[in-house]
Image: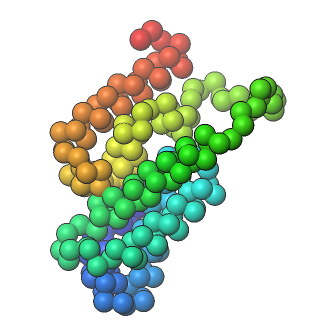
């Protein structure tokens, strides 16, 4: 999580309350503080910067429309990430519907030379992409965004136990991926 957001939970709450009261400065402060972690959350799932930017904009539109539902005193981050998660799910469903109508290509173009990953193993994005959606989401929120187990549980509408289980399974899968890339035996 950014140092800006980790050190200012009280600021986020105060800004959100003022934003609910139509304070433009508070809205600007929230957008500046929360857009970078929200973008990382959305881009980490997509891998496509342009789609992540579109989803970030959609997330802020939804936050604006439902800002009256935020309860003063509650943590802002789980509330915001829950909205961003719904935006991501809706975007996925939309892409799937569109994908059903696209014509598949019979032969894929050859990859450009020099695009093979370095000998050190797969990158973070590649490894995260290998995880099931639920596990990837939990790892991104816990480790990239720095949310607590309780905050991740709220953001994903699940229990702390379910978050722990998904994280544990994700860690096991990531260890196996690293082991394979190092030539180790699973």
Rendering coords of residue 106 (x, y %):
77, 26
Residue at 39%, 54% in the rendered image: 85
Dividing the image into 4 quarters, which one contains the C terminus?
top left
Apparent side of residue 6 relative to residue 133 in the rendered image (left or right):
left
As drawn, 60 above or below 44: below
Res 66 quadrant in image: bottom left
Rendering coords of residue 103 (x, y %):
72, 37
Residue at the farthest front position: 101
Rendering coords of residue 62 (x, y %):
42, 70
Apparent side of residue 12 relative to residue 178 in the rendered image (left or right):
left
Apparent side of residue 168 relative to residue 43 in the rendered image (left or right):
left
Dividing the image into 4 quarters, which one contains the N terminus?
bottom left
Say if residue 186 shows up in the picture: yes
Residue at 65%, 42% in the rendered image: 101
Say if residue 44 shows up in the picture: no
Between 121 and 26, the one nearer to me in the picture: 26
Res 113 quadrant in image: top right
Between 141 and 84, the one nearer to me in the picture: 84
Res 115 quadrant in image: top right
Apparent side of residue 160 relative to residue 125 in the rendered image (left or right):
left
Residue at 65%, 29% in the rendered image: 118
As drawn, 21 above or below 79: below
As drawn, 1 above or below 16: above
Residue at 39%, 76% in the rendered image: 65
Residue at the farthest top position: 185
């Amino acid at each position: 999580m950014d140092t800006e957001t980790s050190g200012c939970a009280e600021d986020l709450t105060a800004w959100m309350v003022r934003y609910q009261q139509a304070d433009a400065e508070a809205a600007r402060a929230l957008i500046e503080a929360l857009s970078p972690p929200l973008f990382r959350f959305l881009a980490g799932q997509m891998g496509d910067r342009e789609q992540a930017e579109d989803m970030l904009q959609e997330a802020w539109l939804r936050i604006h429309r439902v800002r009256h539902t935020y309860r003063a005193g509650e943590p802002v981050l789980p509330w915001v990430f829950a909205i961003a998660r719904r935006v991501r799910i809706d975007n996925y469903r939309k892409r799937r519907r569109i994908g059903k109508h696209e014509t598949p290509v019979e032969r894929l173009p050859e990859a450009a030379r020099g695009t093979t990953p370095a000998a050190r193993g797969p990158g973070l994005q590649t490894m995260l992409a290998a995880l099931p959606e639920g596990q990837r989401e939990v790892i991104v929120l816990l480790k990239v965004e720095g949310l607590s187990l309780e905050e991740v549980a709220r953001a994903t509408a699940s229990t702390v136990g379910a978050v722990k289980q998904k994280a544990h399974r994700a860690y096991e899968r990531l260890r196996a991926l690293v082991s394979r890339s190092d030539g180790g035996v699973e």
